[in-house]
Image: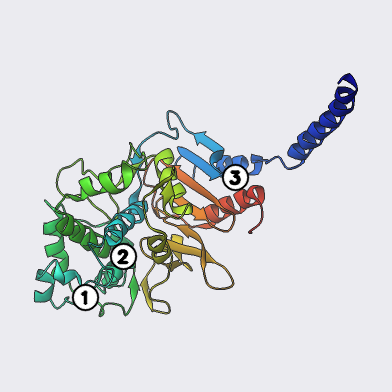
Amino acid sequence: MSLKRSQTCPKFSLGLLFLLLLQTVHAQDFSPVDQLLEKNKKLLGNNIVALVWKDGKLIYKKEIGQDFVAKTQAPIASCSKWLTAAVIMTLVDEGKLSLDDRVSKYIPVLEKYMKSYITIRECLSHTTGIDGKGGLGRLLERRKFESLQDEANAIAAKEISNNPGKEFAYGPSGLNLAARVAEIVSKKSFDRLVQEKITRPLKMRATNFTNDNGGAPNPSGGAVSSALDYMNFLIMMLNKGVFEGKRILSEASIAEMQKNHFPGLPVKYTPKAAEGFEYGLGEWIQEKDANGNATVLSSPGLFGTWPYIDKCRNYAAIIFVKTILGEQKKDFYLQFKEAVDEQVGVCK
């Protein structure tokens, strides 16, 4: 027995030494990411959280700013659209809605204003033809509505710039119409739907669409969240609809959200932060592979917060900021992603 131990232990020690050396060689060095964030912290408002998740754990966390940490709640602006689209897709999974349903089936007032052909799919892909006369200024404008029903009536009366499905114009109308339809088919408020379908099962306790000033929630841009909360949503999206072993969205719904449903359309308006990207359902298609399949999906808040998943490198990341900053160029965010990519490895 003693002879066997004397022969085995050296082998075990050499093997352990090799593994430790291997781990050292491949250790991730996020110091370039740290430096990039420190260099640009003024641009981002001096209150920033950056998280990177891969292989079941956070592999990077950076918190900058006084009392601004990964659990801190803040407005997320247009990052709200990804959450809203996911809520709608849960109802599609349940058979309560079809993406090709006409919205006027649920909101008949649209017929009065010659908008009877708009579909749920067009609402989620910014191709309703309603927001084409807008721009960043119109994107920020929003009257105080008492309910989503009131807002839907106001949207119905808007002048259109084109027929549905004929142009892409990023704006709030489509997502907010779809949210109203969700209320009608579920017979629940949008706030409650978000809680039941997304935030509660994803343990997103700091996330909601509640309008603190009273009145209707804003499904296209009115949510508050935290970096850790939104990361849970990204993990679910990266894992094809599953979070901690529980299915939130079907793989089919995830795939639908990641398709460009109206390729080749003229672009009436796209925010500068997303110029050159394509659009799926509630999310931007930031990168594609050689076969045209989406590999990087994002939903930038256009004012600072930028969540994304990289399916090819199998990781999720978010840059989360405290305040609305004004529209920013996307250069920094792409630099951030490039720096993270260097550490997580090449596409597989």
Question: According to the image, label 3 marks what residue?
Answer: 36
Give the distance between the C-alpha atoms of the residues marked 2 and 3, in whole angstroms: 34 Å
Query: Which residue was labeled with disc 1?
Result: 160
Residue 44 visible in this rendered orientation of the protein: no
* Secondary-structure class at tag 1: loop
Residue 40 spot, x, y in % from top left = 54, 44
Under mark 3, the amino acid is Leu
Report whether 13 appears left or right of 185: right
For this rendering, which residue is in front, 228 or 167? 228
Position of residue 249 measured from the top left corner of the image (x, y, whole percent): 37, 55
Q: Residues within 10 Å of mark 1 (few under 14, many from 20)?
A: some
Label 2 neighbour load within 10 Å: few <14, some 14-19, many 20+: many
Q: Quadrant of residue 265?
A: bottom left
Left or right of 199? Residue 116 is left
Task: Give whichever of 253, 340 is nearer the camera.
Answer: 253
The residue where tag 2 is placed is 124
Image quadrant where residue 228 sits: top left
Q: Are marks 1 and 2 in contact (CB under 8 Å)?
A: no
Find numbered disc 2 in the image and state the secondary structure of the residue it sits on. Answer: helix
User: Is 51 drawn above or below residue 169 in the view shown?
Assistant: above
Residue shown at 49% from the left, 63% from the top: 286
Name the quarter where the N terminus is drawn.
top right
